[in-house]
Image (spheres, rainbow, N blue to C red):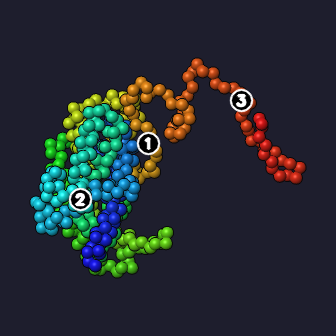
């Protein structure tokens, strides 16, 4: 009986782990936007031109988790599964060596985020080498997502949502509820990007720091729970026939006082490593001219003015107060990414194709006369009234 229950329990834990994101959409989009401000001018114009698309795509890994069964383990690594005393001393940093010691299936079950970060960094480097704008934007955004995940303490433990200590909902409280509610109190003025000599060591250092915050993450919640009654610290909602429980605003306010500095610290540190890895990938690719990938290839006056305003707000730490964070706004559909295409690819699409793709069909050449009459085959609906006052519709042109 025990042999049957244990696999089912592990499967349930893994399924639940697979549905828990990190930072929420708000946090990931904030991290990605701030990372753009921390870049050097040599590549900042390119990233700023595509910032809206970068911010939008930064949540793509979470959006595909329910459809892609291989996605969930990429967002975390449960270090305490390997050892509660010295997990980082027992886990090899290189993926192939970790596989030799623990087997690939075990690594997939308990998370692979450090190696996914390296994979995204390598993909981004290759995208820079290929001068593939769409790929640069895609892998920059996804690299930002996985790096951001590594900064969340609850992404380093089997008890990722407090489900093993009767604190279920702690994950969402820490990484979504607090930053969304208290972003005006947080500091987002991080450090400028720098070249990272050893990206693998850098991401492992981040995970070790995150793991070090776990004790306070749980303990400070426990202290509040001891003095706050259950009917006060939880709220309940009923939807689709199911009742769900979450921490109340009253509990969030007390928890923010206890751990808000930690949440702020991790949120502020993530963009710096993100921008640094973007810069590192670009340099490792030979520093390709990114201006050549933009159309037009120089920022407009409006772009320069807008960036200047946002940089000033970032340095003064008023991005949130000035409502300049894209995460605070409704996300608009991003424009098509600039790409260098072959002559064949640059041919204007037929109007039907353009409509199907959700874009506006190209205007007719100036030399082509515009139609002035409606073809006889067109049918136009005309409303008329009958003697009894009823409306009738007939088709003209039949």
Q: Earlier in the sequence, mark 3 or mark 1?
A: 1
The quarter of the displayed image where residue 297 is located: top left
Q: Secondary structure at mark 1?
A: loop
Residue labelled with disc 1: 334
Marks 3 and 1, Cα distance to the nearest angstrom? Answer: 36 Å
Q: Is residue 149 above or below residue 247?
A: above
Residue 103: image x %, image y %? Answer: 18, 58
Residue 190: image x %, image y %? Answer: 25, 49
Badge 3: few (under 14), some or many (20 or more) residues near its Cα, within 10 Å?
Answer: few
Q: Is residue 322 above or below residue 397?
A: below
Q: Are marks 3 and 1 in contact (CB under 8 Å)?
A: no
Q: Residue at x 19, y 66 (%)?
A: 81
Residue 337: image x %, image y %? Answer: 40, 37
Residue labelled with disc 3: 375
Residue at the farthest right position? 387
Q: Is residue 398 left or right of residue 31?
A: right
Q: Quadrant of the C terminus?
A: top right
Residue 120: image x %, image y %? Answer: 27, 45
Q: Secondary structure at mark 3?
A: loop
Q: Earlier in the sequence, mark 1 or mark 2?
A: 2
Q: Are marks 1 and 2 in contact (CB under 8 Å)?
A: no
Marks 1 and 2, Cα distance to the nearest angstrom? Answer: 38 Å
Marks 2 and 3, Cα distance to the nearest angstrom? Answer: 66 Å
Q: Is residue 195 above or below residue 178?
A: above
Residue at the farthest top position? 367
The quarter of the displayed image where residue 98 is located: bottom left
Q: Residue at x 15, y 68 (%)?
A: 84
Q: Residue at x 53, y 35 (%)?
A: 353
Q: Is residue 178 left or right of residue 85?
A: right
Give residue 105's mark: 2
């Amino acid at each position: 009986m025990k042999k049957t229950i244990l696999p089912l329990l592990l499967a349930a834990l893994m399924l639940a782990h697979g549905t828990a994101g990190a930072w929420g959409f708000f946090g990931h989009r904030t991290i990605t936007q701030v990372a753009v401000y921390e870049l050097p001018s040599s590549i900042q114009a390119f990233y700023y031109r595509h910032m809206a698309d970068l911010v939008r795509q930064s949540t793509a890994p979470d959006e595909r988790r329910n459809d892609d069964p291989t996605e969930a383990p990429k967002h975390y690594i449960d270090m305490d599964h390997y050892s509660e005393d010295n997990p980082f001393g027992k886990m090899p940093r290189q993926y192939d060596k970790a596989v030799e010691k623990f087997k690939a299936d075990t690594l997939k079950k308990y998370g692979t985020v450090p190696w996914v970060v390296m994979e995204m960094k390598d993909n981004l480097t290759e995208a820079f080498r290929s001068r593939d704008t769409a790929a640069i934007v895609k892998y920059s955004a996804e690299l930002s997502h996985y790096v951001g995940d590594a900064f969340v303490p609850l992404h380093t433990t089997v008890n990722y949502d407090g489900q093993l200590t009767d604190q279920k909902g702690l994950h969402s409280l820490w990484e979504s509820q607090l930053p969304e509610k208290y972003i005006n109190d947080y500091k987002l003025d991080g450090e400028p990007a720098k070249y990272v000599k050893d990206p693998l060591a850098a991401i492992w250092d981040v995970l070790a720091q995150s793991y070090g915050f776990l004790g306070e993450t749980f303990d400070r919640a426990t202290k509040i729970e001891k003095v706050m009654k259950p009917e006060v610290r939880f709220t309940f909602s009923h939807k689709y026939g199911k009742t769900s429980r979450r921490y109340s605003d009253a509990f969030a306010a007390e928890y923010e006082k206890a751990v808000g500095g930690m949440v702020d610290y991790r949120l502020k540190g993530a963009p710096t490593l993100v921008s640094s890895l973007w810069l590192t990938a670009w340099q490792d690719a030979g520093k390709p001219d990114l201006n050549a990938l933009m159309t037009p290839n120089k920022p407009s006056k409006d772009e320069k003015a807008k960036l200047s305003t946002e940089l000033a707000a970032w340095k003064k730490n008023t991005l949130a107060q000035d409502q300049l964070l894209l995460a605070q706004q409704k996300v608009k559909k991003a424009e098509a990414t600039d790409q260098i295409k072959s002559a064949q690819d640059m041919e204007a699409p037929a109007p039907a194709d353009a409509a199907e793709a959700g874009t506006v069909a190209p205007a007719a050449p100036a030399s082509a006369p515009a139609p002035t009459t409606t073809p006889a085959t067109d049918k136009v609906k005309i409303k008329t009234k009958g003697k009894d006052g009823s409306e009738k519709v007939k088709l003209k042109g039949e």
